Amino acid sequence: MATEISSTIKAWTYSEYGNSVDVLKFDPNVALPDVKDDQVLIKVAAASLNPIDYKRMAGGFKASDSPLPTAPGYDVAGVVVKVGSEVKKFKVGDEVYGDINPNALEHPKVIGSLAEYTAAEETVLAHKPKNLSFAEAGSLPLTIETAYVGLELAGFSAGKSILVLGGAGGVGTHIIQLAKHVFGASKVAATSSTKKLELLSKLGADLPIDYTKENFEDLPEKFDVVYDTVGETEKAFKALKEGGKVVTIVPPGFPPSIFFILASNGAILEKLNPYLESGKVKPVLDPKSPFPFSQSVEAFSYLETGRVTGKVVIHPIP
């Protein structure tokens, strides 16, 4: 099978930093990525976009970035077409998904998931849940892992309450579901705009809060954990019970909040696969998704509006 793979592939790349609409270009002649001993080569079926993709494209962490030109994309779902000599977990033909960058801000892959093929370490990948489409699986890795790690870092456990700031976003939609259906929260509150409140309830929020009409910090009720995905960390402390914890993924984070940057880990996905396969935890794709590969620039422009519900997915990828 590996012999059929062309040495050049199609990808969306950028050769200079800037806005996606200016710098992201289709390139039909990108070199096929090399496969290291601990990696597999994936025929990409779907990719999803995350804010880190456009922040990186804008030059947000130049000092630790990989050299340009580069194809963006952290999240992938696809089929293994080649395995490195040290790979134990996967074989050719396996359907996999994952966030391909072990450390989000340190030398992300030169050829990311917005390409026909990408290579990734076996440690960042998991077997795709059987009931999910490639588009659904591709929407998950970075955001569901981020949701899970933040809950773990906060010491979240059964019987505790949580307030999610930004409940309808890529990470927020998973925090609600994991808190409720995996960790056993006693109460889940979450903020969103008016038209997204119904989604919050559907995902498991007991108390959807319309941030256009009320300030979460003024609620009489306080919470064991506040998980901030939007950058309101200082206010978040006002909604905490005594001894509670604030987790944030928005830099710089304010001490004593717990701020972290995700280290991608396929073991988290494998752990969550039973919840995905049973339907207890569901992917949330924006109604405009999936965007075809040819509309990757439009997909970025839409993500950059900040109005996305769940995830922006690119599928199919030829």
Image (cartoon, grey):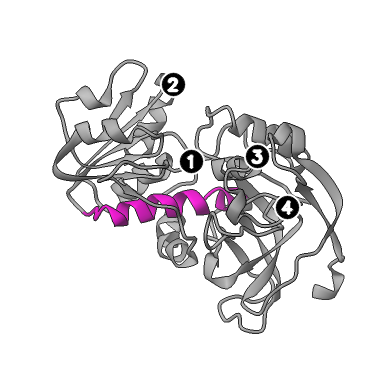
Disc 3, disc 2: CB below 8 Å? no
Instruction: Please say if the residues under marks 1 and 2 sit with CB atoms less than 8 Å apart.
Output: no
CA–CA distance between discs 3 and 4?
Answer: 23 Å
Give the CA separation, mark 1 to mark 2: 16 Å
Q: Are marks 3 and 1 in contact (CB under 8 Å)?
A: no
Which residue in the structure is indicated by mark 2? 195
Reading the chain from its start, which is encountered first: label 2 or label 4?
A: 4
- Sequence-first disc among 3 and 2: 2
Q: For the stretch drawn in magenta, what is the main secondary structure?
A: helix
Residue type, numbered disc 2: Lys
Q: Nearer the viewer, mark 3 or mark 1?
A: 1
Residue, far top: 213
Task: Give the Cα separation between the discs numbered 3 and 2.
Answer: 21 Å
What element does badge 1 sit on?
loop
Q: Circle 4 is placed at which residue position? A: 70
- Say which of marks 3 and 4 sits in front: 4
Extreme residue in the left direction: 242
- Dot 3 or dot 4: first in sequence order is 4
Q: Which residues are magenta?
A: 135-157
The image shows residue 97, relative to residue 308, as above or below, that is below
- At x 56%, y 77%, the residue is 89
Residue type highlighted by circle 3: Pro
Residue at (19% x, 24% y) in the render: 219
Residue placed under numbered mark 3 in the picture: 290
